[in-house]
Image: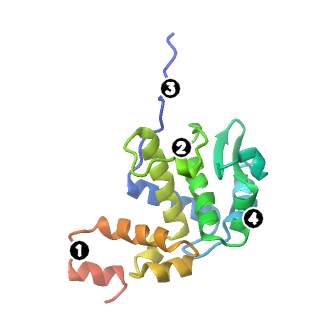
Amino acid sequence: MTKERRAKYPKSFALEAIEEQTQGLRRLLALGDSPYFNVIAAIENGLCRHLPQFALEVWPLGKLGKVEAFTAFSPVRIIVREDIYEGACKDDARARFTMAHELGHLCLHWGFPRPRLAPDAQIPNDPSPKGRIEKEANQFAASLLMPRTVANRIDDPHRLAILCRVSDRAAFYRIHNLWGQNEDLTSEDLRKLFGIK
């Protein structure tokens, strides 16, 4: 019997599939469509309860250097730098996004560990499979922190950022990605998006 070769990279996810994954995680963690939630409590109290083999590990700055966080699978865990963990506990927008990004790797890329890269070592708009994986984790984080039902009703990135406690930049990209999917919107479509009869 021949041994099956494992793929080098995880399968790719369309934005709609990522939206479904985040909605599933929100349901599992009983977050509903709340525009804000405590990401650390959701991980420590919710995810750990549903995924017993999972752990969140906080490592000192000296041990991780420029790497803010990463996801590992043997054992299953998210390792986060101490300052990022503390920032997420205090609702720092970047730290919250970093934690949600790692949840994206956990949910979308199960079993495919990534090399630890400092943010300044990552290439923006990287077309490689590694770049695609990072983009998917970012889309997951944006969808988790800014649910579609909330983001579709707000056309001002700054208002969305304040409501969901994310950065203005993250909110801008979230709105752009959602509206960019619907370039042929009619006036009726827009009214539906905003809940106007």
Marks 2 and 1 close (CB-CB < 8 Å): no
Q: Where residue 56 sits in the image (x, y, percent)?
A: 74, 52
The local secondary structure at tag 3 comes to: loop
| Residue type, numbered disc 2 | His
For the residue carrying disc 1, how many other residues have a C-alpha within 10 Å: few (<14), some (14-19), or many (20+)? Answer: few
Nearer the N terminus, badge 2 or badge 1?
Answer: 2
In the foreground, 102 or 42: 102
**Quick one: SS at disc 2?**
loop
What secondary structure is found at the residue carrying circle 1? loop
Q: Say few, some or many: other residues with alpha carbon within 10 Å of mark 4 (under 14 / 14 to 19 / 20 or more).
A: some
Numbered circle sitting on residue 185: 1
Tell me where residue 88 sits by quadrant.
Answer: bottom right
Q: Which residue is mark 3?
A: 6
Dot 3: few (<14), some (14–19), or many (≥20) neighbours within 10 Å? few
Label 4: state its secondary structure: helix
Image depth: mark 4 or mark 3 in front: 4
Residue at image location 26% in from the left, 78% down from the top: 189
Residue closest to the far bottom: 197
**Percent position (x, y) of residue 165?**
58, 75
Q: Residue at x 46, y 40 (%)?
A: 130
Q: Which mark is residue 109?
A: 2
Q: How many marks?
A: 4
Q: Give the CA separation, mark 1 to mark 3.
A: 41 Å
Residue 144: which quarter of the image? bottom right
Horizontally, residue 175 falls left or right of residue 6, namely left
The first of marks 4 and 3 along the sequence is: 3
- Indicate which disc residue 29 carries: none
Q: Is residue 121 above or below residue 113?
A: below
Q: Quadrant of residue 87?
A: bottom right
Left/right of residue 197 with respect to residue 72 in the rendered view = left
Q: Which mark is residue 86?
A: 4
